[in-house]
Amino acid sequence: MLIKLLKKTGVGLVGLTLLMVLIAGMGSFLSLDSGFSHTKQTEALPLYTQNSLFIDNPLLRIQANGLEFRARVAGDGPERPTVILLHGFPVTSAMWKPLIQVLADNGYRVIAFDQRGYSPGARPGDATEYALANLVSDVLEIADVLNAETFHLIGHDWGAAVGWATVLEHPDRVLSWTGISIAHPQAFSDALQNDPDQQSKSSYFTLFNTPIVPEVLFTFNGLALLKSVYEGMDAENIAEYLAVFSEPKALSSALNWYRQMGNLSDRLTASPETSVPTLFVWGANDPAVGKSAVLDQAQYMKGPYKVVETDGEHWLMTTHADSIIPQVLGHIGSIE
């Protein structure tokens, strides 16, 4: 009798679970933009050519690495030093708007592009296409299209991870490096292995590596969870972020970065040491990054190196742009 009751209870729980998954899945599906509005708007942007004037087309498409990237640009002329800006998850190049025009006004040619998975024209379906080597290749290919043999590089969050890899693997291409929030990959990997604080802060990696579940959670109920992540950000930026992730497969493409992450330090073939002039900015109250990796990365810095610690959390270009921008200008301006 007891066994029969347990079996019936188990069947009921399985049925209830399946029903809840179905309801959540339907709620997520109904939240998506099946009309692909953001893609259509992007396709209407001008395509970059060697004769393009950034001043006339501050938002355009750039073809590189067999893909097409949506990009924000400012400044003009190949004689200007180039600055490439790399965003993280779950935002786009819009996060760099406080910095883009300032850099241009100070004599730089600037490009902040929506990276692989975020640009509608750069959203391969195979998860392996989001491996770190491909993300680094995108940076170099875009620089080549711009005829930028060397460039200054700035990255935040996942953009910082790609930036670190670019610096370590291709130091001859990078004039200066500014990493925001995410520490050196070897130091960060060591912290993940040995530091309980970083292990706790990075526990969300497990969720992001789970098939389907994070997509459902983030898009359910009109992308309510994503909207909570964006609280306090610029309203125009939020609208862009939601437009991107409202499109089918966009969120999966962005999450594929995590699903291909593995051990970041194992993805690198070069020495972990770098002589590229480096500025590192982080928030002491960052819920995703502990202090262990930030302190540990100093051993790999063999060139000019400066750490700026703020009292902020993770979205420092939202909360601390006024203090970060002078540091960035001073850092890249010190490079001959």
Image: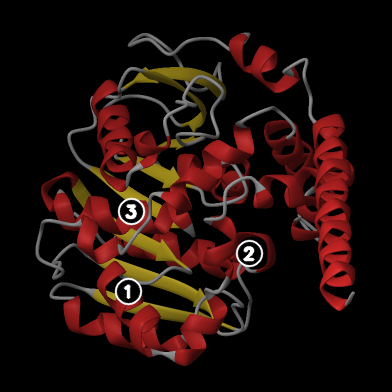
Query: Neighbour class for label 2 at 10 Å: few (<14), some, many (≥20)?
Result: many
- Label 2 sits on a secondary structure element that is loop
Instruction: Say whether disc 3 or disc 2 marks the residue closer to the N-terminus.
Output: 3
Q: Which residue is drawn at 32% across and 74% down?
A: 189
In contact (CB < 8 Å): disc 3 and disc 2: no
Which residue carries the number 3 mark? 163
- In 3D space, how far apart are the residues under numbered discs 3 and 1 (Cα atoms)? 16 Å
Q: Residue 18, image x and y in percent?
A: 81, 48
Q: Residue 327, image x and y in percent?
A: 45, 68
- In 3D space, how far apart are the residues under numbered discs 2 and 1 (Cα atoms)? 22 Å
- In 3D space, how far apart are the residues under numbered discs 3 and 2 (Cα atoms)? 17 Å
Q: In which quarter of the image is the C terminus?
A: bottom left
Q: Residue 282, image x and y in percent?
A: 49, 75
Which three-letter amino acid code belongs to the residue tagged 1? Ser
The mark closer to the camera, 3 or 1, is 1
Residue 34's tag is: none
Q: Residue at x 43, y 68 (%)?
A: 182
Q: Dividing the picture into quarters, in which one does residue 48 lie?
A: top left
Residue 70, placed above or below residue 331: above
Front residue (pair 303, 35): 35
In contact (CB < 8 Å): disc 2 and disc 1: no
- Would residue 79 be seen by someone viewing this image from the given angle? no
- In the image, 202: left or right of 233? left
Instruction: Say whether disc 2 or disc 1 marks the residue closer to the N-terminus.
Output: 1
Which three-letter amino acid code belongs to the residue tagged 3? Gly
The mark closer to the camera, 2 or 1, is 1
Query: Neighbour class for label 1 at 10 Å: few (<14), some, many (≥20)?
Result: some
Which three-letter amino acid code belongs to the residue tagged 2? Trp
Instruction: Say whether disc 3 or disc 1 marks the residue closer to the N-terminus.
Output: 3
Residue 189's tag is: 1
Which residue carries the number 2 mark? 315
- Label 3 sits on a secondary structure element that is helix
